[in-house]
Image (cartoon, grey):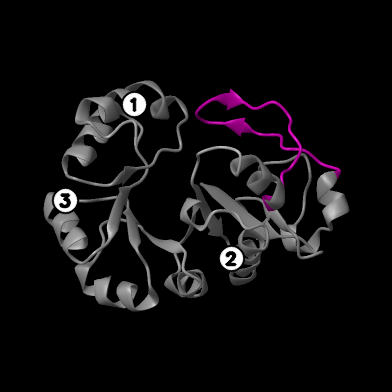
Amino acid sequence: EVDTEVDANFRVVMMHDATVDRTTNLTGTVTAMTTAAIRAGYLDMFDSYIGYMEPEKIPYLFEVLEWAVQTPVTLFIEGKSSIAMNASLAMVIQTRFPKKRAVFISQSQSLLDLPSRCGFLTQIIVAGAPNPANFASYKATGIGMIAASSWTADLVAQAKAAGFLTEYYSSRYKTEHDTYLNMGLDYVMSDDPVAMVGPWTDSMQFSGRWPP
């Protein structure tokens, strides 16, 4: 999963926040900074999961796509604004990145309309439990996947009956992996790299879902 913003030159840069202060050695608002200014800095942060991260150049989306096309990964792309989402979509189409390996995600339903109409799988991110009353609206927008931070077996069944893929975020422990996979969820997401290696793959192998 990657987050995108646009810089002052309307180039798509990988950045979670609206400012560069938290994750780089720079300060300022992404949209007000030129490509040259961002290129002069580097990623510089302490990650709560893996500790201090070695300085790296700040990547742009085209670089991520160049890397990803050579791997089997699927990119979940979250444009942090309307312009970032649409610019990310244009970049994916322009570079002919495989459509089946790009999923556009957002907490804003309206931002997913254009990617859906362009034939990409889109995912709505829901804080808490998904509300079945919204399923018809999601379908009308073309949304194909629901990611939520709280699920019950009944909600999973309702979402699947409505034709949605389902995902839980964000898992940190093996017990969470097992609980949600046993509910029949299609995906489990984690921000913790360690959780995605040992316990997670053990759970997937045990459940017969790995390799995919």
Which of disc 2 and disc 3 is earlier in sequence? 2
Numbered mark located on residue 85 in the image = 2
Residue kind at label 2, given as amino acid type: Met
Mark 1 highlights which residue? Answer: 201
Residue 177, quarter of picture: top left
Q: Position of residue 120 (x, y in %)?
A: 47, 64
Q: Residue at x 22, y 31 (%)?
A: 208
Q: Residue at x 38, y 76 (%)?
A: 141
Residue at the image position 75 percent from the left and 60 percent from the top: 11
Q: Residue at x 65, y 50 (%)?
A: 15
Q: Is residue 6 above or below residue 101?
A: below
* Residue range of the region highlighted in magenta in the rendering: 40-61
Badge 3 density bin: few <14, some 14–19, many ≥20, Cα 10 Å = few
Callout in the foreground (3, 2): 2
* Amino acid type, residue under disc 3 in the picture: Thr
Q: Main secondary structure of the magenta part?
A: loop
The numbered mark, 1 or 2, whose residue comes first in the sequence reads 2
Report helix, strand or loop for mark 1: helix
Is 47 a magenta residue? Answer: yes
Circle 2 SS class: helix
User: Taking 134 as reference, is 121 above or below it?
Assistant: above
Mark 1 vs mark 2, CA separation in Å: 31 Å
- Of residue 93 and residue 158, the one placed in the foreground of this image is 93
Q: Amino acid at mark 1?
A: Thr
Query: Can the viewer see residue 161 in this picture?
Result: yes
Q: As drawn, is 27 to the left or to the right of 154? A: right
Q: Residues within 10 Å of mark 1 (few under 14, many from 20)?
A: some
Q: Residue furthest left?
A: 154
Q: Would you name the residue on which mark 3 appears?
A: 152
**Mark 3 or mark 1, earlier in chain:** 3
